[in-house]
Amino acid sequence: MAEADVNQYKGKVKPSWCPGCGNYSVITALRRAMATLNYVPDETSIISGIGCSSRFPFFMSTYGFHTIHGRALPVAIGHKLANPKQNVIALGGDGDGLSIGGNHFIHAGRKNPNITYIMMDNEIYALTKGQCSPTSRIGTTTKCNPYAWTADKINPVLLALSFNVSFVARSYSGDIKQLEELITLGLQHKGFSFIHVISPCVQYNKVTSFDRIKELVNPIPEEHSTEDRLDAMRLAFDNDTLYTGLFYSIDKPTYEERVDKVIEKAKATVPNGATVEEIMKQFT
Ligand SMILES: Cc1ncc(C[n+]2csc(CCOP(=O)(O)OP(=O)(O)O)c2C)c(N)n1
Ligand code: SF4
Ligand SMILES: [Mg+2]
């Protein structure tokens, strides 16, 4: 089948991120991945929280939902359950997904809904002009923390691996080709696919710049088995190297499959046309 036209995914609103923002690479890579997989805009929903990165749905021609801060994942999961044929992509920033939405990230991963989650990590709250986030490095100074940030950073890849997310990858905005490949794989994965993207903010985070990240990134060694969770954790744990590529990918039942099984079981015990009272009798 011929590859779809990438331009069909462009929304009516042009991206309004600052020139040089890492998020431009993410939107380009996602549109290309969707074209490769022949995604139909009407059959795709992009659901975000709040933040610079979360403005994303406005810039796409798909269905979109710009929810509230930290709530992209529960809305995306509900949407997928109600409409399982829809391609559902949740996305947002490090603040959105690890501060206020941190709880949802953990519980979404455990359930394994068949959705993709892209976290654009600039190690800062950018929309609100530069407060430190859960991925800011200890000692970071910003206008809001003029002396030093005092907490250790969260490692999103290690966190996802700790609760057995079924697909875990990392890339960065300076490598669109790799980003596109990983997003394509993530979209094809059956289950929760988490793609952590180091996506520098050129305005409010001078520490995590493209140049600095370029020095730290390295592809995951070829001998790594993507079914080996412990080895994936060891690679993610390395603080001197930011490994990029596919850390982990396994097959396990999705949330929709698990819920369907429960519905089937319940239906089998209830005669057709039973009243609520008759159903309740089973439990008394
Ligand atoms: C309930 C709630 N709390 C706080 C805010 C303020 N707020 C908006 S965006 C944001 C953080 C954005 O950081 P991140 O999610 O990393 O996105 P970025 O702008 O860096 O892409 C905060 C704290 C809000 N909009 N709603
Ligand atoms: S403030 Fe930072 S994250 Fe927001 S659009 Fe500008 S460069 Fe991107
Ligand atoms: Mg951020």
Image (spheres, rainbow, N blue to C red):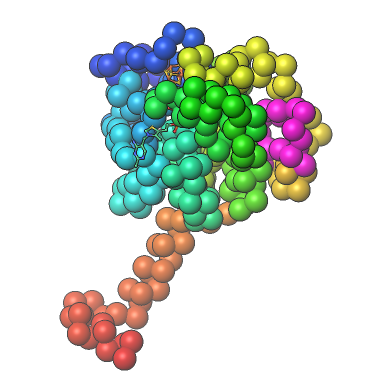
Residue at the image point whose x is 48% and y is 27% from the top? 144
Residue at the extreme bottom:
284
- The quarter of the displayed image where residue 153 is located: top right
Give the left or right position of residue 51, taking residue 195 as reference: left
- The quarter of the displayed image where residue 140 is located: top right
Q: Return the residue nearer the eye: 171 or 51.
A: 51
Q: Position of residue 149 (x, y in %)?
A: 59, 32
Residue range corresponding to the magenta coloring: 234-250
* Vertical position of residue 247 compared to residue 141: above or below: below
Residue at the extreme front:
147
* Vertical position of residue 241 compared to residue 234: above or below: above
Residue at the image point whose x is 33% and y is 20% from the top? 59
Q: Return the residue nearer the eye: 79 or 4.
A: 79
On the question of residue 233 being in view, the answer is yes
Q: Return the residue nearer the eye: 231 or 101.
A: 101
User: Number of callouts in the render?
Assistant: 0
Q: Position of residue 210 (x, y in %)?
A: 61, 14
Q: Position of residue 54 (x, y in %)?
A: 38, 30
Q: Return the residue nearer the eye: 13 or 254.
A: 13
Q: Quadrant of the N terminus?
A: top left
As for residue 182 lying within the magenta part, the answer is no
On the question of residue 228 being in view, the answer is no
Residue at the image point whose x is 30% and y is 34% from the top? 66
Residue at the image point whose x is 42% and y is 12% from the top? 18
